[in-house]
Image (tube, rainbow, N blue to C red):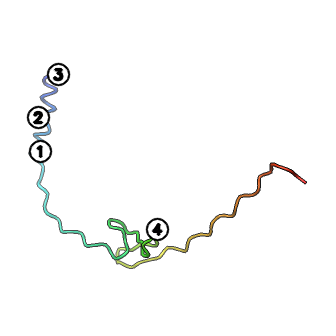
């Protein structure tokens, strides 16, 4: 029983490989627009490492909104001297 199982596991990939098609050559992908990350639509226009906007499929750059202000400092703790 185990020999048949092992033989079957060895022959199935060979049989399926005979049916596979060879892949055709595909044209190279055009380079991304200036300032964008390759393989992504995100863009870092000023080169600081933070994404500044994105490109749409027609190649138009859309900047993100300005960053939000930092959160307010935390309230003082209720511990300590009161008075």
Local crowd size for mark 1, using a 10 Å CA cut-off: few (<14), some (14–19), many (≥20):
few
Q: Which mark is residue 11?
A: 2
Residue farthest to the left?
Answer: 18
Q: Nearer the viewer, residue 71 or 6?
A: 71
Q: Which mark is residue 50?
A: 4
Local crowd size for mark 4, using a 10 Å CA cut-off: few (<14), some (14–19), many (≥20):
few
Relative to 6, does residue 47 appear above or below in the rendering? Answer: below
Mark sitting earlier along the chain (4/2): 2
- Where the N terminus falls, by quadrant? top left
Residue at 16% x, 26% y: name it: 5
Residue farthest to the bottom?
Answer: 60
Mark sitting earlier along the chain (2/1): 2
Q: Which residue carries the number 1 mark?
A: 17
Q: Give the alpha-carbon distance from disc 1 to disc 4, as whole Å.
A: 46 Å
Task: Label 1: state its secondary structure.
Answer: helix
Relative to 35, does residue 16 appear above or below in the rendering? Answer: above
Residue 35, position in %: x, y?
37, 74
Q: Which residue carries the number 3 mark?
A: 2
Q: Nearer the viewer, residue 24 or 33?
A: 33
In this picture, residue 26 sits left or right of residue 41: left
Q: Quadrant of residue 9?
A: top left
Mark sitting earlier along the chain (3/1): 3
Mark sitting earlier along the chain (2/3): 3
Q: Which mark is residue 27?
A: none
Query: From the viewer's perspective, is the residue at label 4 or at label 2 nearer?
Result: 4
Q: Are marks 1 and 4 in contact (CB under 8 Å)?
A: no
Residue farthest to the top?
Answer: 1
Residue 43, position in %: x, y?
41, 71
């Amino acid at each position: 029983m185990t020999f048949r199982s092992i033989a079957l596991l060895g022959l199935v990939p060979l049989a399926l490989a005979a049916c596979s098609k060879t892949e055709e050559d595909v044209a190279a992908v055009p380079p991304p627009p200036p300032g964008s990350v390759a393989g992504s639509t995100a863009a870092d226009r000023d080169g600081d490492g933070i994404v500044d906007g994105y490109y749409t499929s027609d190649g138009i750059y859309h900047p993100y909104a300005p960053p939000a202000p930092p959160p307010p400092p935390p309230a003082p703790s209720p511990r300590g001297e009161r008075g």
